[in-house]
Image (tube, coloured by chain):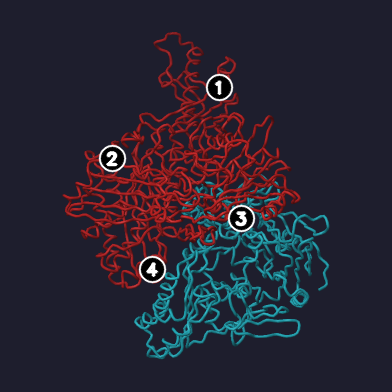
Amino acid sequence: MSITRNYIEFLFGTKLERITWDSQQTLVPTTTVLQYLRGLSNFKGTKEGCAEGDCGACTVVLAVIGKNGKLEYKAVNSCLVFLPQIHGMQLLTIEHLSDKNSVLHPVQKAMVEMDASQCGFCTPGFVMSLFALYKSCSQPTDETILDTFAGNLCRCTGYQSIIKAARHALDEITPDSFKLNEKATIQLLQTIEKGNACFATANQAYYVPETLASALSVKNTFPKIQLISGATDIALKVTKKKETLPAILDLSGIEALKTVHETHQGYDIGSGVSLQTIKIELSTEYPALGKVLSVFGSKQIRQVATLGGNVGSASPIGDLIPLLMAYRAVVIVKSLAQERSIPIFEFIKGYHQIDLSEDELIVSIHIPKPNPNRIIDSEKISKRTDLDISTVSAAMEIELTSDKIITSIHLYFGGMAAVAARAIKTCEFLTGKKWEAATLEAAGSYLEKDFAPISDARAKAEGRMALAKNLLIKFWQNNSE
Amino acid sequence: MSAKVFHESSELHVTGKAIYVDDINSPSNTLFGYVVTSKIAHGKLCSFDLSNAQKVAGVAAILSWKDIPGHNQMGAIADDETVLVQNEILFIGQALFLIAATTEQAALQAASLIKTEVETLEPVITLSDSIQKGWKLNETVVMQRGNALNAFKTCAHVIEASAESGAQEHWYLETQAALAIPGENREIKVFSSTQHPSETQSKIAEVLSIGKNQVTVETRRLGGAFGGKETQANMVAAWAALLANSTQKPVKIRLFRDDDQRMTGKRHPFLTHYKVGFNAEGKILAYQVSFNANAGYSSDLSMAILARARTHAENAYYIPDILIESTAWRTNLPSNTAFRGFGAPQGIYAIEDAIERIAVFLKKDAAEIRHLNFYTKTQNTTPYGELVENNHLETIWEKLVKSSNYYNRKEAVDSFNKVHTYEKRGIAFTPVKFGISFNTPHLNQAGALVNIYTDGTVLVNQGGIEMGQGLYTKIQQIVAFELGLPIEKVLVNATITSTIPNTSATAASSGTDLNGMAAKNATDQIKERIAAFLNKHWKISDTKNSIQISELVFSNEKITHSKKTELTISFTEVINLLYTNRISLSAQGYYSTPNLYFNKETQQGRPFHYYVFGMAVSEVELDLLTGRHKILRTDILHDSGNSINPNIDIGQIEGAFMQGVGWCTTEEIKWDVKGNMLNHSPDTYKIPGIRDIPQQFNVNLLENAPNPNTIHQSKATGEPPFIHALSVLFALKYAIASIKNHSIYPDLDIPATNEKMVLCIQKLKD
């Protein structure tokens, strides 16, 4: 690809900031936004609580120009965002909220007035999550508030005061300084040039192509290159395992991968579409998908993480994979030479293994429109409801006769094997049986023939099996009317 | 003190301007400190080779035990911990070597190049293995009254059972951190995230072999602590000090989250066996309980924690014949340590579990059994001989039964359960009585320094640590009230060992009780000086009419004679007059809690200054298939005396309750057979999130309950409300027991994870 840009630019508050990867640069491209901030002497407000996106103490807000030409504000975990990923955006930290005269932003004021801080260490993260909500929501419900904070942990307050602060702040949303400066901000953001970029240091090359063709050409040249999009998983290699990733292909700059197309058959969802976008746009059409996404990670994660990333990682506990199997989703992959469509069930080949050649990229996932004769449902069990990886997850596609006889059933489980997998023997047993509680109770013993789960940090084998059996009954309970 | 006062740092918190150890802009030559730890749980460090590691560019120092100038000893009470392993390796995560380097990368690279030869020994990980192997940390301690073993013979009913509770990680948001800056002549200054600066100072002096007077430890605030920084911050500070001393450069160590979780101690897992004797009404006549605590590899505070478990074994109940035994057991795990409640939650859990069993056995309401057994005006002596005075149990019971609508809601719960197959509801009513004071009498002392400047502003230093609990705010309020100033005129700043020496840890909920009194003692001294001066200034020569301090009203920045209101002077004026008359405007206050004693031999005495009382009612709904549950409603009525700051106290209660809910439900730590901690990050260790709080959460303070002989008649609040979370556990068990119409008590311990509940339900159904 033709590479012209070796720098990134972003608005740091109101100031245009440029970081150039020339011979003088000491920051590696995979420096996270959190590491960058912590290295500055005047931006210590953003805290590191876990460096893995599980606590939200490092939450910052990224503003981008949205489709309607206005600024959209997203709260993200700065510990999981690499510097190149904020190119062209406005980065807002806790230091930017109160104005020059130290007048508190309404969200900050509400947090003070409702006694919503105790030790204060998680507080900047909560404030930034609340700020993003304040900037993007006109009539927030309690559910919106809880969803907004599901990615922020507090160990002191018991959260009630924080919820009160949010209600108080959102009670009356008035134009703040960010609203007043919106035009100027947009103008500044528009001055930032896009285009293919590559940032190279002695130990790392970081490619940010602007088009799919460029990306494919990079992939063709460097078949082993580490792919990222939202990077919410791969970033942990840097922050937790302290690995230096020698070569990275960052797909987050490719607009063509971020589109959702409706066709007669279904939806083609670009691999770079964020899970939050899918939650908002497709939950009505695909209720089971909406159900899973409502307990997927946190808002901070979902706004960054992509569908392509979740499918591509092929984790046995990937929340979406069993359900995509039930939806009979198809993965569309491309190389410079060809395009292939692979049913997701075949695409996932093994533990973190997928059917993707070295010169290919996942471009989209096709989800067929739900067949009105079939019921599709999903369940996820985790120790904590929010921001927790599943202990066991399951998805079901079922077709019943009018007198409730099962004519066809597909059951897929996550967390029960090295790969998300179909419960073949259980489905065989259930086919032709009556859709009633007793049938599903009896089916439980067949799960033992399908799966031999492991014991790990999340649950024991015995517990996983018991939960999986119960999910069969749960599916009946959910769909017994 | 009527106007609402916010947390003194709240504006700093919400603007990100509050400075924690890692936020201090240290000198540019500050080195990155890193700790190399053991990967085996039990064994011997036979030899090591640092030569390749030392060659890494940017490495300034790599230290082993051989490089420690002073004692290689870190135990808080017993001398049984090493700073760096010398020979025996006792847990995974134990410190072997220290590295100081210019960058994290250099330190990590050096760490990977250290060669060691170790001999692996079989580790002991679980409490039952330790008991089987006889790895007692100390001899069993017995506390008793009457003769429980005899009394059982005459009881109508006797139940024997076990109650087990797991480890709990503190999960303070700010991991352990220290910044050590070497000074001249071997002096050293350390900024440490410690709850106990004096002990941190002490340990640094010991390992560096210098005087305590050469070590200054400073702490402005902690990003949460909950007991986890009471002893365990000492190590991190000592490591940083060793590296700073060796390199003569500033060194900062901040533990990564996973390292913090792997290296530091937890709440003690307990395995408790009990036997309870009672009559047909449910009156408990005899109780025998044996606490076994998993101490981890060393003593730390385990014996003190068991002392609190013993003194809370009977909770709010008068039990005539009682026999309490406790034993701490060694294992190859990090040394378990203080955590909010300090053994009391585990101690109380057993008697509350016994009551739930009695209720199932007698087919009675558990709350009624509790009520029947409360301490009363006449049955008011604890097993250790202290009287339960100013007992609010009955008052709280009456008020909470009413405000929570307990009986009607219990009926509604039962009706709900009759018509639902897969969802069950549960409700439980639990009390707490909690003794306030350190169990060890001599620790109950504190100091404070109050300086008044000639512009009328006041600076307060005291020995307590601000960790979110609002201590500084309450101190500020106390001093402002005593001097009649608006709180803006009073600044409380960092806690420093050079200003207030020989302090106790900020622990045992006693921060405000002790330090608040010390601060008041300081202002009293200054007020005495003001009174003496005003006698002269107002020319009151007749000694009969001389002004007593009690006759002066300090209010609205003025000092006025209460009987002769024409005698009045502004605060700033009198302060300036004192200055020009060469009278000191600074006072060192001191306080020691009166009338505390405890005989360790007889286990009798008066260890507590007073008791805190409170009760909670929680209602839950449980999905039997998934173990998912929600707390529909929790009502708490809690006694904070005359609360100095009601909003801060309510925040403490809500937070403690949710921390307890985590202990009771989602927070689970497992180890593999080799001693590797499996839940070493928030990925798999789950503290409560925002959706886990009660859907309706009513927290109220008991009104009109002044506490005699404490600062402004207040009560401590930090730990006791943690116990209220047991109401959630027992509500869940009630929901499960409804499957068998409450004929069987479910086998379910702490933490009741969704997995364990589902397995318990399966067992009940089979």
Looking at the picture, how far across and down is residue B671, in whole percent? 48, 59
Give the residue pinned by disc 2.
B382
Label 1 – label 2 distance at C-alpha:
45 Å
> Which chain is mark 2 on?
B
Q: Which residue is mark 1?
A: B585
Among the chains pictured, the one given red colouring is B
Does A334 sit above or below residue A252?
Answer: below
Query: Is the residue marked by circle 3 packed among few (<14), some (14-19), or many (20+) residues within 10 Å?
Result: many
Can you tell which quarter of the image residue A446 is in?
bottom left
Q: Chain of mark 4?
A: B
Specify whether residue B722 is in view.
yes
Q: Which residue is labeled 4 in the image?
A: B758
Compared across the picture, whether B708 is left or right of A196 comes to left
The local crowd at label 1, few if under 14, some if 14 to 19, many if 20 or more residues have their Cα within 10 Å, is many
Query: Which chain is mark 3 on?
Result: A
Q: Secondary structure at mark 3?
A: loop
Residues at marks 1 and 2, common chain?
Answer: yes
Of the residues shown, which amino acid type is indicated by label 3? Cys
Task: Report which colour depicts chain A.
Answer: cyan
Q: Disc 4 or 2, which lies upstream in sequence?
A: 2
Closer to the eye: label 2 or 3: 2
| Image location of residue B502, percent across then percent down | 51, 31
Q: Quadrant of the C terminus of chain B?
A: bottom left
User: Which amino acid type is shown beneath numbered disc 2?
Assistant: Thr
Q: CA distance from mark 3 to mark 1?
A: 44 Å
Under tag 4, what secondary structure?
helix
Q: Quadrant of residue B731?
A: bottom left
Tell me, for residue A58, which label it has, or none: 3
